[in-house]
Image: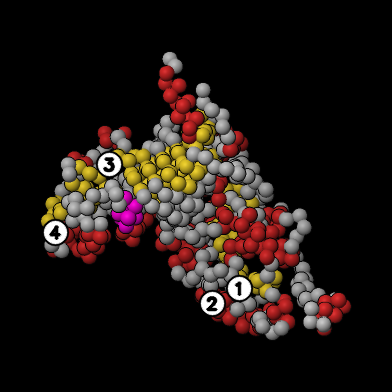
Amino acid sequence: MVPNFSSNDVQGNGDQGEEALNSAETSNNELDFDNFILEIEPETASFEAETIQTKPESNPNLQVQFKSEGGRLLLILPPAPEKSRNPVHWEELRRQLKERISGGERFLQPHTPVHLIARDRLLDSQQVQEIDALLSDAQLPLKRIYASRRQTAVAAATAGYSVEQQTTLSHLGQGQEASRQAMDEPLYLQTTLRSGVEVRHRGTVIVLGDANPGSSIVAEGDIFIWGHLRGVVHAGAGGNAQCRIMALHMQPTQLRIADKVARSPDDPPAQYQPEVAYIGPDGIRIALATEFALADLTKKESP
Amino acid sequence: MSRIIVMTSGKGGVGKTTCTANLGMALAKAGQRVAVVDADFGLRNLDLLLGLENRIVYTALDVLAGECRLDQALVKDKRQPNLALLPAAQNRSKESIKPEQMKRLIKALTKVYNFILIDSPAGIEMGFRNSIAAAREAIIVTTPEISAVRDADRVIGLLEANDIKAVRLVINRLRPAMVAAEQMMSVKDVQGILSIPLLGVIPDDEQVIVSTNKGEPLVLEENLSKAGIAFTNVSQRLQGEKVPLMDLSIPQESFFTRLKRLFGM
């Protein structure tokens, strides 16, 4: 049995697209104000010609990420901004890197050699040095740089780093069709996520701290908040409806799991207890964490 | 033809967003179809003032990226279905959108809405340029302080340089008592410097803070506060009605209060 606790707290809201679709047939000339479709005009042709050569990265959930592999740490940068649906420019990249370094202090063991995977990003020597400086703040030595762009490789080499230029990154599985199903290892963050911070991760996200209003987490796996959840969180962003959101203090602006959306009740409850959000038969539901774990176990035992 | 109005000030914290929320709501109440557009990318607030934060699914940037249609990003107000909000993205900077893209968004909105209010960010940089790109009219919001008036003056100049000629003034947070004691610039002082037509004067009112925190614009209240009445009046003037300026002079002291003061109580 799935407990019903506070199932009224959230209201499913994930079907607004359908509603709008139905109205397309009804009227063509006269706009029905209660039910209309509105689209912006496509960008002008000249602009399109520029972008057409670059194939945009299909996965928007790519940010700076650390990955441990055989005793070394891979620092993988997001793809070049001009190729991404969710472009990460240098300023943003530096901020993300700072946040990851300060947020994962205990996960990042000092003196672990770091290999920077620059992919197809364009970096100048100053930017490479800046990345190195950020890493050395966490006592992480930058050992080697992999880049597929020649300019980046040259810039890194002139700055005095050992460089390897590669044309493809197939062994890392980035952007490969086959590897897209596999999720990344969980992202552990010990930090407060403030307004405007967006964490995107192809896997589970664990936050030891609060997620403030205005912050957002988009994870392809589960989301655990060991603290107050007050922002927007999206678990199972890749479409996995089995994903869950857990928080010690569940007071989100909005919860999203796969393609379902729910928002908090207008009158907040007087008391908060650890809760779990999951997709039930009628949209997103919320259960007490303690009862949820029990229900989950009994469900597995029954045939 | 739809009216596209940018709400701007130059200086921050003078009440642009409060004015946009209340004016939008007042116009919608009067039966107009209103879209309010948050152009403050990275520091969005308009959704909070309207109490719509938790209904946002897509933002203007998602529309531009082709992730959704424009109507999917619009958040309709449950209390007043004539009002819709086009939210800004919170996780990006002002540079993430170009004036040309803003124009495309607004152009599409004009097909459905007859009033489009654009809430501009403070400053005169990229965010400001985006917010004025599609506008045909402007409302300058200022407080009776020299710094706010100075910045407003600069912005009026920039608007004129960008061919936005219909510029009108809202003076926010006026304290009649302080004006009477000559401690605050009067409406006349402000108008003397800016020399643009006056659309309204909003008195300083603690209720504004209450309504902001509740996410319910003042003009929705049953018993309108003074500021609520002033916002409603501004919306009526914006629709071409002739409404006299509210009498903001302080009420005469009663006999008892005068007596009390006489005895130093």
Please give left or right for residue A60 compared with residue A288 in the image.
left
Instruction: Report the residue marked by disc 1.
Output: B142
Frontmost of labels 3 and 4 is: 4
Instruction: Report the residue marked by disc 3.
Output: A175
Q: Position of residue A250 (x, y in %)?
A: 51, 42
Residue count near mark 2 (Cα–Cα under 10 Å), binned few <14, some 14–19, many ≥20: some
Instruction: Report the residue marked by disc 4.
Output: A161
> What's the amino acid at mark 3?
Gly
Residue A263 among those drawn in magenta: no
Residue nearest the observer in this picture, A275 or B207: A275
Q: Position of residue B143 (x, y in %)?
A: 62, 74
What residue is shown at x 74% (from left), y 62% (from top)?
A: B225
Rendering quarter of residue B263: bottom right
Instruction: Report the residue marked by disc 2.
Output: B151
Residue nearest the observer in this picture, B83 or B219: B219
Q: Please give the chain letter of the residue carrying mark 3.
A: A
Frontmost of labels 4 and 2 is: 4
> What's the amino acid at mark 2?
Asp
- Local SS, label 2: helix
In the displayed structure, would residue B85 be above or below residue A264?
below
